[in-house]
Each structure stands twice: as C-alpha cells, then as structure tokens.
Image: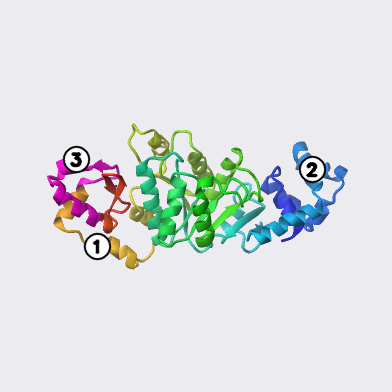
Amino acid sequence: MNLYEYWLAGSLAIPGKKKIKLKAMFPEVGELYRLKPSQVEGISFLTGLEQEKLKERQAVPEEELGRQASYCRAHNIGLVLWGDKDYPVRLRDIYNPPYGLFYRGRLPVEAQASVAVVGARNCSPYGRAAAEDIGYRLAQAGIAVISGMAAGIDGAGHQGALRAGGQTYGVLGCGIDVCYPPGHRKLYGALAAQGGVISEYPPHTKPYAMLFPQRNRLISGMADAVLVVEAKEKSGSLITADFALEQGKEVYAVPGRASDALSRGTNRLIRQGAGIFLSVGDFLEEMGVFKKEPGPSTEKQKISLEKMERVLYSCLGFHAKNLDRIMEETGFSLGELLPYLASLQEKGCILEVYKNYYARAGDPV
C-alpha cells in the first residue's frame, strides 16, 4: 500500500472528484504531500477550507502513515483507487466518485447484476421478514445484494442473501474497521467472508451522522437498481433513491397501507413514478437484464400445491394475518390449519412474520 496514496485517500475534507484532479496534477502523490503552503494555496479548485485541511494532512508524519498502512495490512484491509483495474466500474462515472475504497473481503464483480435493498432502521416485523426474503431470493437468482449494514431492513437484506449462500456487500458510513451498529459484529464478519465490507473512509473514522448521506451514493452507485422496502417520509433510504435517479438507476418500492408511517416514504416514491415491487419474480422479469434460467432452487419454489394449501395461500396477502382471521376466512379448524401452514412455510411460500401472524413470501406460486 503506497503511503501517499493512503494519505490522499484518507483526507476526509476533500471530495473524491477533487482528489482525482489532484492525482492528475501530481501523478506521484508524494509531491503533493511535500508541497509548500504557498503552493497548496495556489491550487485554485480547492476552497480555502479544503486548502487548510490539506495542509493539516501534510503535517501527518510519514512514520505515522507507515504505521497506519501496516495496520491495514495486518487487518486484511485493502485499498483500491480510482483508475485501478479493480475499482468498481459502476462507480467511475457517478457524480463525485470516491478516490479510494477501503475494503475487507471482496469488491463487487462487474459481470454480476446487483440490487440495493434498503429501508428503515426501525422497521416493522413484516418489513424485516420481507427484506430477508427478498435478499434470499435475489441471491438465489445470482444477484448481488448491496446495502448499508444498518439495523432493520439493510441488515435483513444482507442476512437473506447470506442464508442463500449468495454475494452481498455492506457499504459503511464510518471507517472500514468500525462495526456500526455494534450489534452487527457477526454480520460484519459474515459479509467480509461471503462478500465484502466497503468504505471510502479510512480506519478508525467514527460513524458521524454527516457521513451517512454521502455513503448512500455508493450504495446506489454499485447497484443496477434500488429497492426500498419500508421508509418514513423523511428517510435516509429516500436519499439513496434520489442518488439512484441521478445516476440513471431504476428505483422500486414495496407498497404498503396508507395508514402505516413506514409506508409513507415508499408509497410516495411509487406516486412519483418508482416501480411497484410485488414479487422478486415480477421484478426480475421487468428488469430484463436480471433474467436467469431457473435452477433447482427456483424449480422447488414453483412446486405444485395441494388443493387445501392453495385455499390457504389464496387467503394470505403481503400483510400479515393472525390465526383467528385465517381460520375465519378459510373455514379451517386450528388442527387442520397448522399442518398446511407448516407445509407452505417449508415450501417457501409463506412467512411467519411474528408469532401466529402469517404473510405471503416474495413470489406467488
């Protein structure tokens, strides 16, 4: 790891697009590190504050940079730079691309289609179950799942993809070695092992609130489409959707009841023209580029249902119903109902969203 490239990549106060211009001016970044203050002040495209922050970064001794680079090597942290062959192609032409990406595990594979699954941190049990199911089914179809490793919808989407043995990548709003939220340490480790953890922020950077909105442009930038599962009217997920639209990406949203606060953001996206997400199968078909020949796992999802299972399945929707309501609508006794519920769960057709409440899984049978 080149010390001076590490130094420039870790300069938080300078936007990525300006770091790229600095690199073009100083191909040997060590020259930039050694500029005199008057020379820094002569770089016209830097604001006064950015010039001062660059001079502050110049004060970091080379010995300290060496220790920081050694820390990265010891902790399996890689650094890829804009223009490197391994730099994600999807990010190269976005507005303000990151100059450098720190990562653990792997970076997304350009040839693999990818979808960002994002949503509310304080999600509903239904939203959590839906996001995990969506992540699972996307991964089964060979789609990489991109998200922010946050609590709620983000984490559930990652977990679904991991459960399916697929590729999933977490984009952090903090230093690459900082697990946020702290309760996701197990998820962090699983992502590094089965996909990747990625950040434009260097090690030890704390999860400052101002860093997360900018992080969202990378989530949308690495994805071919963005899917919002649940979101309030003012939500970071809607920022991700806005970035996606600016980047020319497709945006889809899971519709919800008008009375639910967590559906207001997604319903508003739909009103503004976002695609309506009803099932992974429909979504993949609409997106065309993601089509994939059915494999053994897909065939299993399309297994024929018995007559009584179909009666039960047709009674359920994408909002959970409790056992009493299901018995009332189907006419089944509890003894008749439970075996059918267990069978449909085993076939992946329905989910127990929370105790004794059931809803359809992503793809209708």
Can you tell which quarter of the image residue 140 is in? bottom left
Indicate which disc residue 56 carries: 2
**Tags 3 and 2 touching, CB below 8 Å:** no
| Magenta residue check for 317 | yes
Estimate how packed mark 1 is, as few (under 14), some (14 to 19) or many (20 or more) residues with alpha carbons within 10 Å.
few
Residue 224 placement (x, y as % from top left): 48, 54
> Disc 3 to disc 2, how far (Cα)?
66 Å
Q: Mark 3 points at which residue?
A: 324
Q: Hey, what amino acid is under mark 2?
A: Glu
Q: Is the magenta stretch mostly helix, strand or loop?
A: helix
Q: Which of marks 1 and 3 is in front?
A: 3
> Disc 1 to disc 2, how far (Cα)?
64 Å
**Residue 328 or residue 336, whichever sits in front:** 336
Secondary structure under the numbered disc 3 in the rendered image? helix
The residue range painted magenta reads 315-344
Q: Which of pointers 1 and 2 lies earlier in the amino acid sequence?
A: 2
Secondary structure under the numbered disc 1 in the rendered image? loop
| Magenta residue check for 339 | yes
> Disc 1 to disc 3, how far (Cα)?
27 Å
Q: Hey, what amino acid is under mark 3?
A: Asp
Q: Quadrant of the N terminus?
A: bottom right
Can you tell which quarter of the image residue 136 is in? bottom left
Residue 356 placement (x, y as % from top left): 26, 44
Q: Nearer the viewer, mark 3 or mark 2?
A: 3
Number of callouts: 3
Q: Mark 1 points at which residue?
A: 303
